[in-house]
Amino acid sequence: MANTVVIGSLLYSHVIPIILAFVGVILLCSGIMDRKKNYTIAGIILFFAAGTVPFLILPLVLSS
């Protein structure tokens, strides 16, 4: 049980936010350079999601 909580907390606090932020920056740069508003907006949303996901999911993972 403890290993599952440690792996879950590491996954949600270190792995997923980095992946979301990286994809968000790629979409943001691609959207600005190609003048595609959809890519730019998706990049902004993913980048901000990378910052907020740990604060929303970690309390649920650590409380169980």
Image (cartoon, rainbow, N blue to C red):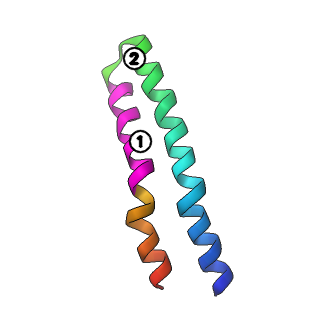
Question: Mark 1 falls on what kind of element?
Answer: helix
The secondary structure that most of the magenta stretch takes on is helix
Task: Count how many numbered circles sit on residues in the image.
Answer: 2
Question: Where residue 64 sits in the image (x, y, percent)?
Answer: 48, 85
Residue 25's place in the image compared with 31, above or below, is: below
* Residue shown at 45% from the left, 83% from the top: 63
Dot label at residue 32: 2
Rounded to the nearest angstrom, the CA distance separating label 2 from label 1 is 15 Å
Question: Mark 2 falls on what kind of element?
Answer: helix
* Residue shown at 38% from the left, 65% from the top: 56
Question: Where residue 1 sits in the image (x, y, percent)?
Answer: 64, 87
Q: How crowded is mark 2: few (under 14 residues within 10 Å), some or many (20 or more)?
A: some
Dot label at residue 60: none
51 magenta-colored: yes
Q: Give the range drawn in magenta.
A: 38-52
Horizontally, residue 8 falls left or right of residue 55, namely: right
Residue position for label 1: 46
